Amino acid sequence: MIGLSAECQPSSVSAARRLLAEVSRVVVLTGAGVSEESGVPTFRGPGGLWRQFRPEDLATPEAFGRDPRLVWEWYNWRREKIAAVEPNPAHRALAELEARLKAGATAPVRPLTLVTQNVDDLHERAGSRAVLHLHGEIWRLRCTGCGREDYDRRVPLDPLPPVCACGSLLRPAVVWFGEALAPDTWDAAVGAAQACELVLVVGTSALVYPAASLPAIALQAGARLIEVNRDPTPLTPRADVSLQGKAGDLLPQLL
Ligand code: BJW
Ligand code: ZN
C-alpha cells in the first residue's frame, strides 16, 4: 500500500492516476462521504445521522411497523435536504471518468459500473449513467400491500404517511437494516466486481454488509483497490493506494 501521511499525498495521487490509466474496467463503490460536500449528512462520525437518531427507530421494518408517520417524517426531512442540494466535484469527476472510459472502450463491455449505497440521485444529476443503488432510492415509493413502485419527487409529501390507491401504506423504496438487497441489483454489482480490474472506493465507512464485501470480492478476483476517504477504514490496509482527504478535492485530481 502507498502511504497515508500528508506528505505522501502528491505521490499517492500520481500512483492512483497511473493505476487508473492502466485499466479499462472499473467498479466505483460510493457511500455517504461522496455527498457530504453537497450538504447531505453522512451516517456515522461527527455530524452523522446516527449521532442524532437511533437507526432502530427509523431504519428498520419494525420501526416502520410501529410508527410509519415518524419514519416518514424523517424521510420527508431528508427528501427536502436532497432536493435542495447539487452534485459536487466528486460526483462530477466520477461522471467524467465514466465518459472517458466509454470513449476509450474497445470491447463491448461496460467500462465503469458505479455502485452506490446512497439513496440520493446526485450521481445521476452529475451525469453518471450506469448507477446501481444498493440501498434503494429516496425518490421511489413502494406499496406495502400490492408492491407497486412509483417515482415521486414531491417535496414535502403530504399527507403523511402516504397511502397507495389500493389503500395500503406506501414506504420509501430503500433497504433498511435486516432487509435483503434487491437481488438483481446485488447480482449486477457482484458481477461487475468480479470482472473489473480496479475498484475505486469513495466515502464509505465500509461497515455495512453486504455492500462492504464488494471490494473484497473484486480483490479476490485480482482487481487493484484505490480508496478515497477523509478517515482510515477497515479497507485501508488492503488498498493499493489510499488517499486521505475530501473526495471533492481528490477525485478531480485523479482525472
Ligand atoms: C468522506 C467525506 C468527504 C465523510 N470525502 N470521505 C450486526 C447487527 C445487526 C445487523 C448486522 C450485524 N452484522 C451484519 C449485519 C447486517 C447489517 C449490517 O451490515 N450491519 C452493520 C452496521 C453491523 N446489514 C443489513 O442489515 C443489510 N441487509 C442484510 O444483511 O440482509 C440480510 C438478509 C438476507 C436475506 C433476507 C433478509 C435479510 C441491509 C443494510 C441496509 C443499510 N441501510 C442504511 C439506511 C437505509 C438507506 C437510507 O435511508 O439512506 O444505508 S444504513 C446506512 O449505512 C445507509 C448507508 O447506505 C449505509 C452505509 O453507510 P456509508 O455510506 O458507509 O456512510 P457512513 O456515514 O458510515 O460513512 C461515511 C464515510 O465517508 C466515512 O468513512 C467518512 O470518513 C467518509 N467521509 N465526508 C471523503 N467529504
Ligand atoms: Zn398498493
Image (cartoon, grey):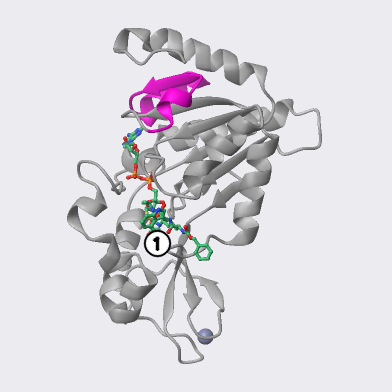
Q: Percent position (x, y) of residue 168?
A: 45, 88
The answer to whether the beta carbon of the residue marked 1 is less than 8 Å from any atom of ligand 1 is: yes
Q: Considering only vertical position in the picture, is 201 above or below 185? A: above
Q: Residue furthest bottom?
A: 167
At x 35% / y 74%, what residue is drawn? 62
At x 53% / y 53%, what residue is drawn? 133
Within the image, what quadrant is residue 114 found in?
top right
Residue occupied by mark 1: 177
Within the image, what quadrant is residue 21 found in?
top right
Crowdedness of circle 1 by 10 Å Cα count: few (<14), some, many (20+)? some
Within the image, what quadrant is residue 100 found in?
top right
Task: Judge whether residue 33 can be spotted in this image.
Answer: yes
Task: Judge whether residue 160 can be spotted in this image.
Answer: no
In the depicted view, which residue is nearer to us: 203 or 191?
191
Q: Considering only vertical position in the picture, is 85 above or below 158? A: above
- Give the tally of numbered discs: 1
At x 47% / y 65%, what residue is drawn? 179
Q: Is residue 43 left or right of residue 163?
A: left
At x 25% / y 74%, what residue is drawn? 70
Magenta stretch in the rendered image: 234-255
**Amino acid type for the residue under numbered disc 1:** Phe
In the rendered structure, does residue 242 fall within the stretch colored magenta? yes
In the depicted view, which residue is nearer to us: 253 or 241?
241
Q: Considering only vertical position in the picture, is 38 above or below 171? A: above
Q: Percent position (x, y) of residue 118?
A: 43, 50
In the rendered structure, does residue 132 fall within the stretch colored magenta? no
Q: Percent position (x, y) of residue 159?
A: 32, 82
Where disc 1 sits, the SS reads loop
